[in-house]
Image (cartoon, grey):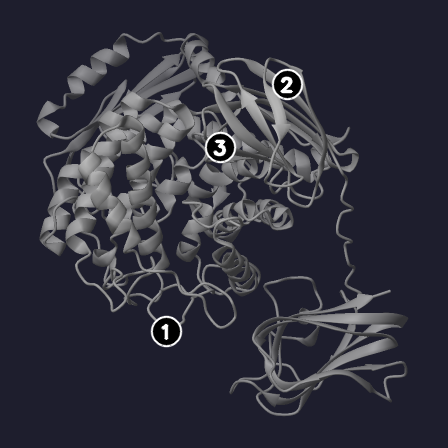
Amino acid sequence: MIYSQALSVDNEWITSHNAYTLSPGGYDNVLRVITKGGQARSDGKKIVITDADEVLLLTTIKWYENLKDGSVATLKKSMLDLPQDYQTLLKPHAAAHGEIFNRVTLDLDGGEDRRLTSEELIEKMYDASRFYFICSAGDFPPNLQGIWNGVFTAPWSGSYTFDANVELAMDSALSANMAEGMEGYFSFIESLVPDWRINAKTLFGARGISAQIVASPNTGLNLCYAGVWAWQFWTQGGGWLSSYFYDYYRFTGDKVFLKNRAIPLMKEVALFYEDYLVEIDDSGHYIFPMSCSPEVGGVLLSNNSVLDVAVAKELLTNLIAGCSELGIERENVKKWQAMLKKMPPYQIGPDGDLAEWADGIFKHHYDHRHYSPFYPVFRSFEFSLETTPELWKAAEVSLEKKRDLWLHYGTDEPGIPFGRVFHAQSAAYLGQGDVVEEVLNSMADRLYPSLHMSLKPNGGIFNFDGNGAYPDIINRSLAFSLNGTLDLLRSVPPSWDKGSIHGILVRGQIEIDHLQWHQSSGIINLELTSSIDQQITLRVPASKSIKSLKIIEGTAKADVSTRGDNARKVTLPANEKVKIEIHHDVVEPKAIRTDLALNKTVTASSYLRGYDSNLAFDGNWRTLWSSESSDPQWLAVDLGKEMTVDAVELCWQHAGKCYTLEVSTDNVNWTEVYSTKEGKRVREEVEFTPTKARWIRMHGTERGTVYGYSLWSFEVYGK
């Protein structure tokens, strides 16, 4: 907060000298007005310009850790030294900006009239998001609004929020080949370490560091609680934020950075865990006490949230790997390995999904905008189909539930961009290209004309995090590398039959110079350059088999792999462009079913005001039919003509415990095709013997709650 401001306005200058409330810091702001023709005059509060041919505005803002170091006069002098011509000022900026921006291009083959295609919009959103990151990443990382806002009082004070938003803002920096933009993030995080040590000592009596959730450049102290969430127990921050330091090493191979910046920060987090993890359960595993899953349930706390456990495991794993690579910290490595073995196991619930807390009592808050339990698939990549198949399957089941209960039909800030991108990142890692496509396309409903994203519908609140992660969703769907395995088209959307991307980076010090694909022809052309000599496993999706892999250019060598028909071993030479042509078998795309009941005539036993019966058949995930709170109730649809039907999909808000599905050819005589006494909330897919029908109805005889029957959607399939 600012407690004092010295504002000065004359005919040419507006200056302000601003001091913070809770620290000795502050900032100076200088604006210079240069006119060609006309007149500029001031009344001491504003500048009024009349009859000018051209107006050039030059502005600069300088932040100071100690405001005593500031000087408005010095800033004014720097402005006087600048050229007074817009094109002269623009030229070096455009060159520097363009050099970074033009490294990467995405082409989704949108056809001749590209302005009318969704592919063109996605390309533009990809480019716009990279453009905005380049603009926003300077001395500091992008905050909640990047460097833009639109109002004088920024939402959430334009802060740096560390339980999702800042991380997403940074997510594309490395894969989208904008590594220069990381330095502001690194230096900002490092500047907060002294205050984070105070947090750890004061709140937990621990050594090391504990990050706060809400930060500003002038303090890292944990001061913001808002009386709503248990933010003082948010212990995951240091590990999550430091993961970007280690990721920088994995992308670049910069061992000087690893030794001097990444390892020291990660050691501070590990030191905190040494003192914090003192409780042990009966099985010899650590207990993460008072463990939160960010912003879920207000002050809801339990033991061993997935986020706490996953971040700690990732931190220790990365720290061990980094120190082993450098040949340092041998004694500490042994200690960290012992700590890693004592991490509590994750908990899988009765439905095969992942518990949000591994506390012995299954719970998972699916109808929530945050995706903390999915950290092992959107960030740390701990779960693997090869090494942890049970956890992989649990993540798939959980993401499907999250898709139903929040992405499609959620009530907690539905459609918020950061939740959507977490979902898409998780789906991309799990190889779900259809889900990636759904999310990428859906995000068009939150766009300003500038292609910035809005937190709320209709331009409600400008926010940066959705744009920050958008390119990374696409990059990891097309080329994803981890621990010596490079996956091509891991989760490419099914409708992207042809396309290309060039200039992106993947972990393992590899640049994808060019990747071109044609799914329906089974052809992939790949050009890549490795900064080091290395052998990798090159894979296409598991649903495909590689027919041939040929080195077209370069001295790389290819060989068979023991990891499946979709994989080959490739030995890459350092700093040499290698061209590879891959032919794989063609898998017929999954048939797209047509909802026969969409927007058809509907009747119902009852409905509540605003929840009409037709709303279950309008194709809109956010509208629903609700009946009166009594039994029985029914909802019927007229398909318009007799058809062969064989499946119904119901998406419930409040499910019927006992109900039947019935069909009719005359709307008088009804035949039961399905019945249940255990109806569940969420999505129920019912298949039955192909049956001739024109009318189909859900006939509920016993409600599952005190409320009426409520359906988000009622879909009918067949021929």
The image quadrant that residue 135 belongs to is: top left
Closer mark to the observer between disc 1 and disc 3: 3
The image quadrant that residue 703 belongs to is: bottom right
Separation (CA) of disc 1 from disc 2:
53 Å
Q: Amino acid at mark 2?
A: Lys
Separation (CA) of disc 1 from disc 3:
38 Å
- 463 left or right, relative to 272: right
Residue at mark 3:
484
Residue at mark 1:
361
N-terminal of the pair, mark 1 or mark 2, is 1
Residues packed near mark 2 inside 10 Å, few (<14), some (14 to 19) or many (20 plus):
many
Residues packed near mark 1 inside 10 Å, few (<14), some (14 to 19) or many (20 plus):
few
Residues packed near mark 3 inside 10 Å, few (<14), some (14 to 19) or many (20 plus):
few
| Residue 521 % position (x, y) | 79, 33
Q: Is residue 617 visible?
A: yes
Residue at 58% x, 26% y is 570
Task: State the SS at label 2.
Answer: strand
Above or below 548: residue 227: below
Residue at mark 2:
579
Closer mark to the observer between disc 2 and disc 3: 3
Disc 1 + disc 2, Cβ < 8 Å? no
N-terminal of the pair, mark 2 or mark 3, is 3
Residue at 30% x, 53% y is 341
Above or below 151: residue 224: below
Above or below 74: residue 623: below
Task: State the SS at label 3.
Answer: loop
* Nearest the eye: 184 or 10: 184
Above or below 537: residue 408: below
Q: Is residue 21 visible?
A: no
Residue at 64% x, 44% y is 542
| Residue 670 % position (x, y) | 83, 87
